[in-house]
RNA sequence: GGGCGCUUAGCUCAGUUGGUAGAGCGCCGCCCUUACAAGGCGGUGGUCGGGGGUUCGAGUCCCUCAGCGCCCACCA
């Protein structure tokens, strides 16, 4: 045994990281059977996102569970993935290189991205754009892997996947085709929420409401022969040309007489009916609303349920269409010229102009009244979403099917949630679904929808007759691959074919991470050994997307849950307990902290955060973790130093057995906590015992432990020290991965991370817990006397008079010699009483 | 509007079947004690958010109110 002179934490990451890689310490053994395997569906980080402390927090928590399960003897299937496809990467590439994808451009073989992004984005061909995406994500993934390795995540790096990789594309397209075959996927032309900046449809799951400034504009609709004018209030007067009806509540007496009548829109004179619908709110505005196609999602409901015509004015670029909508012939003579004033303007500009026009015509009543109201935004977007009609692909998810929705609520009940209350978020999301899952995106860096359409003799696509590839051709890109029975020359020609131009949203692929990671369809043997998986760890903010979507996919494809348990981690808050976000500029990056405090200290902080509990970045906690690590170094060095001199003997001394009994209780508590995914409790219990062990037990027995090799008392102490040290090192192994490996290596063979998790029986010698407790507390009381007297702990006590309960004094008697030695006490008397108290006479004090 | 979580020492937080309030940090004091001075020992510090109830007994159970955070919602 070679003990370091001055043990240190420095350099442990550099020492053990490569060693674990070389020894394949965390490699998955695929010969193990399903019941011997613990499989984890690790969240693939969005590599285009920033590295921040939130990135380390949840992953470390999961890693502690993974490591404890591994020590329990389970074979860990613990791969890492990178989520690199999708809009997030496209945006990063746009900003990083200063380019913009224009799919209409031909490929320029000489294209090279500029050194630095210029003032104006360079338009480039789709293929070039995708190549830049492919190039940049590789760089980003390196940075993530470097961080993860430094953090000591015990993933098997040989099994890494990416969501844009071939396996993912194949799985994603295969799953798509199978859902299509089972009528779980369909395409439809329908109003969809549309981001005018990214120019793509977005799904319900990607929406967020933002309080936005707007104004009520009161507009006069003309009653003509049917009666008086009607004033409505709207926040979107620019959509007036898209108005198809007015609507009020059926019970609203103010408008009851008008239902079924016709009024004419201001400025354009378009006749529109006055209708009744229970969704109209009598309290809002003037109690009667104009229905436009489309101003908001309520308009869509009204349009559908009242079977109204479509008058589209909003273009996909967020500007009003050049052509006026179909109004019929019975309109104002000037309708067209007035619309021409709005055409081509964006929503804000058009609003400004139409308000002027309305004011001129006298149809604007009073001044606009400013309000704040919630408006739907794409969660990463900067302008409000519009609603445009387009052909999109959908997966059924219960949004339009009560029975299916209840099925998914049932799946949520079936899943074990940690903490349990997180299921509420799942339930409220599923209950609130109102559309199917829109999966197609009018974007470029994603898994292509694997579909072609035949073109008829006029060159029009036959949307209802999609042509599909065979599964063994996957993955395909319909933009370059050709459907069976056609030649490449027929692309875009009459009687030829055309590719579906869309890609799937990133969630449509990442909702298959359990299948992708476990080799579904690619490696049936691996799949059978690892799926359904054991654990899905993830953040709370993606319950409605990643977690729910994954359940949907596994339900349809396999008729099961994708995993048995899910552990939801909390948020990481900045040191001032504010949610970290890039826009606030309060993001804390992990690398400097890792370098400053060490990986184990960062892991300690992460694992101190209770499951599901928001936790602030706290350098104080990191320092505590570092101190604990140093303590473990020193305590290990001391114990092993004692053991080095003489052999361990049979554990006979009551206090030795007593300490081990307390350790046994700790082991049980830690094992139970881990079984419930409560790594934080396990850490706290281990830590509490460890400090007692160091402060009290080591002090009490060190003199005895130094005793002669053949002394039974010394042998007992050394035996207990050895056993306790082994157990303590293993209890800390899931948390302090580097320092525990280091101290383990001083006296044991093999990695501690493959050593067996301690059991309570290992340290159970039937000891009386009271002996150690009484000795420790009495010693503490002696110290207090010395501390009050302001003398050294080495100061001799000539006589100590201990009062305590009879039962505790009896326990203490079994440890008297250790107490005398530790307290430097010459003589000791005991008196039965009700409470512990110690009167000590100090040798070197004046009388 | 509905739901969930949180509210305990100056700070960050534990407190698992209800039984005399805990830890770390900070602060104060002492101690170079041969594992550890990037340490050790000891101490100060709380009417457990407010109010009501159940109970012999409530931080812990019930009701209610308030503040903070988050989730969901058809938002003219």
Image (tube, coloured by chain):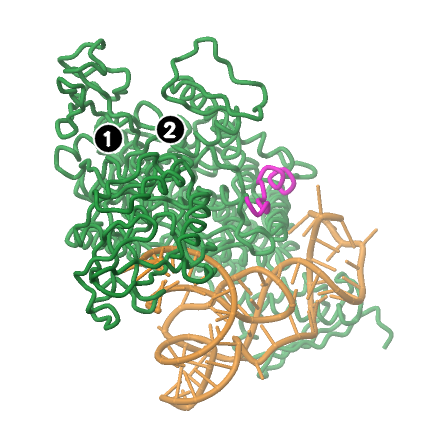
Viewer-side residue, A336 vs A200: A336
Tag nearer the camera, 2 or 1: 2
Labelled disc at residue A520: 1
Which residue appears at 22% of the width and 59% of the height?
A274
Kindly identify which residue carries mark 2.
A162
Label 1 residue SS: loop
The tint chain A carries is: green
Chain letter, colour orange: B
Q: Can the viewer see residue A43? A: no
Above or below, A754 against A702 in this view is above
Q: Quadrant of residue A692?
A: bottom right
| A127 part of magenta stretch | no
Instruction: Give the image location of residue A449, x and y in percent.
Output: 25, 28
Q: In this rendering, is residue A26 above or below A758?
A: above
Looking at the image, residue A847 lies above or below residue A654: below
Magenta residues, dominant SS class: helix
Specify start and end residues of the magenta stretch as a single range: A583-597
């Amino acid at each position: 045994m070679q003990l370091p002179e001055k043990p240190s934490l420095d350099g442990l990451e550099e020492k053990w990281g490569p060693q674990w890689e070389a020894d394949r310490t965390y490699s998955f053994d695929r010969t193990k059977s399903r019941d011997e395997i613990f499989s984890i569906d690790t969240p693939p980080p969005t590599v285009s996102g920033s590295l921040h402390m939130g990135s380390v927090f949840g992953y470390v928590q999961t890693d502690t569970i993974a490591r404890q399960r591994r020590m329990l003897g389970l074979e860990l299937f613990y791969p890492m993935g990178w989520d690199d496809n999708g809009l997030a990467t496209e945006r990063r590439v746009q900003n990083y290189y200063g380019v913009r994808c224009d799919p209409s451009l031909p490929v320029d073989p000489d294209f090279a991205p500029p050194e630095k992004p210029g003032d104006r984005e360079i338009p480039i061909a789709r293929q070039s754009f995708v190549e830049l995406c492919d190039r940049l994500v590789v760089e980003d993934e390196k940075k993530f892997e470097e961080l993860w390795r430094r953090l000591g995540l015990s993933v098997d790096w040989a099994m890494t996947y990416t969501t844009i990789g071939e396996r993912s594309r194949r799985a994603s397209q295969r799953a798509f085709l199978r859902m299509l075959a089972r009528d779980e996927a369909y395409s439809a032309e329908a109003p969809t929420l549309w981001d005018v900046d990214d120019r793509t449809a977005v799904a319900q799951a990607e929406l967020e409401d933002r309080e936005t400034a707007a104004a009520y504009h009161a507009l006069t609709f003309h009653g003509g022969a049917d009666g008086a004018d009607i004033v409505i209030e709207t926040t979107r007067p620019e959509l007036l040309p898209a108005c198809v009806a007015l609507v009020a509540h059926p019970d609203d007496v103010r408008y009851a007489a008008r239902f079924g009548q016709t009024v004419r829109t201001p400025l354009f004179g378009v006749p529109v009916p006055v209708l009744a619908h229970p969704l109209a709110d009598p309290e809002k505005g003037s109690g009667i609303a104009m229905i436009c196609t489309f101003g908001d999602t309520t308009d869509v409901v009204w349009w559908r349920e009242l079977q109204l015509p479509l008058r589209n004015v909003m273009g996909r670029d967020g500007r009003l269409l050049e052509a006026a909508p179909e109004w019929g012939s019975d309109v104002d003579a000037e309708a067209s010229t007035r619309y021409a004033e709005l055409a081509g303007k964006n929503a804000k500009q058009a609003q400004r102009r139409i308000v002027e026009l309305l004011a001129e015509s006298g149809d604007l009543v009073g001044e606009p009244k400013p309000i704040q109201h919630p408006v739907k935004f794409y969660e990463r977007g900067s302008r409000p979403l519009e609603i445009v009609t387009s052909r999109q692909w959908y997966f059924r998810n219960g949004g339009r099917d009560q029975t299916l929705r209840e099925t998914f609520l049932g799946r949520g009940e079936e899943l074990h949630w940690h903490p349990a209350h997180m299921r509420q978020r799942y339930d409220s999301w599923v209950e609130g679904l109102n559309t199917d899952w829109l999966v197609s995106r009018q974007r470029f860096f994603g898994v292509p929808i694997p579909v072609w359409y035949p073109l008829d003799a006029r060159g029009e696509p036959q949307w209802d007759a999609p042509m599909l590839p065979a599964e063994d051709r996957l993955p395909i890109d319909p933009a370059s691959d050709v459907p069976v029975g056609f030649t490449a020359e027929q692309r875009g020609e009459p009687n030829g074919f055309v590719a579906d131009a869309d890609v799937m949203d990133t969630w449509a692929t990442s909702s298959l991470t359990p299948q992708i990671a476990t080799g579904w369809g690619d490696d049936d043997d691996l799949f059978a050994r690892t799926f359904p998986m054991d654990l899905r760890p993830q953040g709370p903010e993606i319950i409605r997307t990643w977690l729910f979507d994954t359940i949907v996919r596994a339900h349809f494809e396999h008729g099961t849950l994708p995993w048995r348990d899910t552990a939801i981690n909390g948020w990481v808050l900045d040191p001032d307990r504010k949610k970290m976000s890039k826009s606030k500029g309060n993001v804390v990056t992990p690398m400097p902290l890792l370098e400053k405090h060490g990986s184990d200290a960062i892991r300690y902080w992460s694992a101190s955060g209770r499951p599901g509990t928001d936790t602030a970045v706290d350098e104080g906690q990191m320092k505590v973790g570092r101190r604990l690590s140093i303590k473990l170094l020193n305590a290990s060095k001391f114990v092993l130093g004692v053991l080095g001199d003489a052999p361990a003997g049979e554990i006979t001394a009551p206090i030795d057995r007593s300490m081990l009994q307390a350790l046994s209780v700790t082991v049980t508590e830690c094992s139970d906590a881990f079984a419930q995914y409560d790594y934080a409790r396990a850490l706290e219990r281990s830590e509490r015992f460890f400090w007692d062990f160091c402060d009290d037990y080591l002090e009490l027995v060190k003199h005895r432990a130094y005793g002669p090799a053949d002394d039974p008392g010394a042998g007992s102490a050394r035996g207990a020290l050895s056993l306790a040290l082994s157990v303590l090192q293993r209890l800390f192994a899931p948390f302090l991965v580097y320092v525990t490996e280091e101290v383990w290596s001083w006296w044991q063979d093999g990695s501690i991370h493959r050593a067996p998790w301690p059991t309570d029986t290992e340290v159970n010698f039937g000891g009386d817990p009271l002996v150690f407790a009484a000795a420790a507390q009495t010693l503490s009381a002696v110290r207090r006397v010395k501390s009050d007297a302001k003398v050294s702990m080495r100061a001799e006590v000539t006589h100590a008079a201990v009062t305590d309960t009879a039962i505790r004094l009896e326990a203490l008697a079994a440890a008297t010699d250790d107490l005398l030695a530790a307290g430097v006490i010459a003589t000791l008397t005991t008196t039965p009483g009700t409470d512990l108290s110690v009167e000590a006479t100090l040798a070197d004090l004046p009388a």
